[in-house]
Amino acid sequence: MAIGCEMADVNFNTQLCQMREFVNNTLQRILAGQAGIDEDLKEALKYTLEAPGKRVRSVLVLWCCELVSGEVNHNAEIAAAAIEMVHTYSLVHDDLPAIDDDDLRRGLPTCHKAFDEATAILAGDALLTLAFEILAKEIGEPTIAIRLIGELAEAAGPAGMIAGQMADLKAENRQATEELLAYIHTNKTAKLFRCAAAMGAICGRADKKQLKCLCEYGLKMGLSFQIADDILDVCGSSEQLGKTGGKDARAGKATYPAVLGMEKSKQLKKRLANEAAAVLEPFGLKADTLRKLAMALLQRTR
Ligand code: GRG
């Protein structure tokens, strides 16, 4: 599966596909190993987890671990699955009629359309809870497990993703300032990217300087990613995006193109990706895969 952009770097693309496959297999294995789940709920979980997401956050966990330790270890594999579950929960709930009310996600009917609203609410709840269960039970060392749980809870919680989502809803049909927009996008999206980088670094036993550097990379890349998302919502078709295009403007959302205009949004997206790549300087050439990821996401078409 391509990231949805033109990529001349065949090697990078192959590595990305391999990492995605790795994440997909882990998610399938974890879900298959869960006992005592209602069959209909399990079907909904399988449906949402197996839908073709780009797996950017989970691959980021794996590559950050590999960068600091030289390998992808078991803890990083579990952390990658956990963050993908939290991300997928957020999409399932975001698509609900009470939030963004969408019919299409990852090129498929949204969870509440494929099943029903109650099942989608419960599937989202189950994904969020299961993410923390696997971190608590499957990470070898308790000190690492606790740090990972803390990072993920903070990024996805009421002073992170939920804060961003709340501010996003409150900003609908209002004139947003650039400051408010940065707050929404940082909380709604960038903090989970920062968290992915932090989780990978923790699994790879990064020192304080390495952890700080990767967190900064994740935050900048996450903000660039959300600006790209805003831009794609204006420019992309639903077929290309795998989700309904043009929704932000119709819903009166506070987006970068709406506040800054298209050209300035594109410049900011690029500047943040370049800054993300630049903060990796202390890692030297070893960080080239992460630099390429920041650049590839700039050109993504879905
Ligand atoms: C608790 C009711 C309730 C709702 C929570 C937390 C939340 C709803 C929503 C999160 C906010 C959100 C959906 C932010 C958008 C972030 C974003 C750009 C999502 C798309 O990410 P991609 O492009 O998706 O990586 P794929 O499908 O590729 O995984």
Image (cartoon, grey):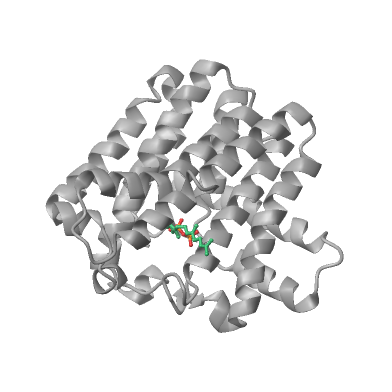
Relative to the observer, which residue lies in front, 153 or 239?
A: 153
Relative to the observer, which residue lies in front, 193 or 32?
A: 193
Please give left or right for residue 191 compared with residue 183 in the image: right
Relative to the observer, which residue lies in front, 182 or 235?
A: 182
The spot of residue 223 in percent (x, y) is 34, 44
Residue 87 visible in rendering: yes
Residue 21 visible in rendering: no
Query: Image height check: is 293 above or below 261?
Result: above
Furthest toward the right, the residue is 36
The structure residue drawn at horizontal position 74% and vertical position 71%, both measured from the top left corner, is 42
The structure residue drawn at horizontal position 53% and vertical position 67%, both measured from the top left corner, is 93
The spot of residue 72 in percent (x, y) is 65, 35
The spot of residue 187 in percent (x, y) is 41, 46
Q: Quadrant of residue 111?
A: bottom right
Q: Quadrant of the C terminus?
A: bottom left
Query: Image height check: is 258 above or below 74?
Result: below
Please give left or right for residue 112 compared with residue 296 in the image: right
The structure residue drawn at horizontal position 42% and vertical position 17%, both measured from the top left corner, is 282
The spot of residue 139 in percent (x, y) is 76, 37
Q: Quadrant of residue 238?
A: bottom left
Query: Image height check: is 78 above or below 142?
Result: below
Q: How many marks can you see?
A: 0
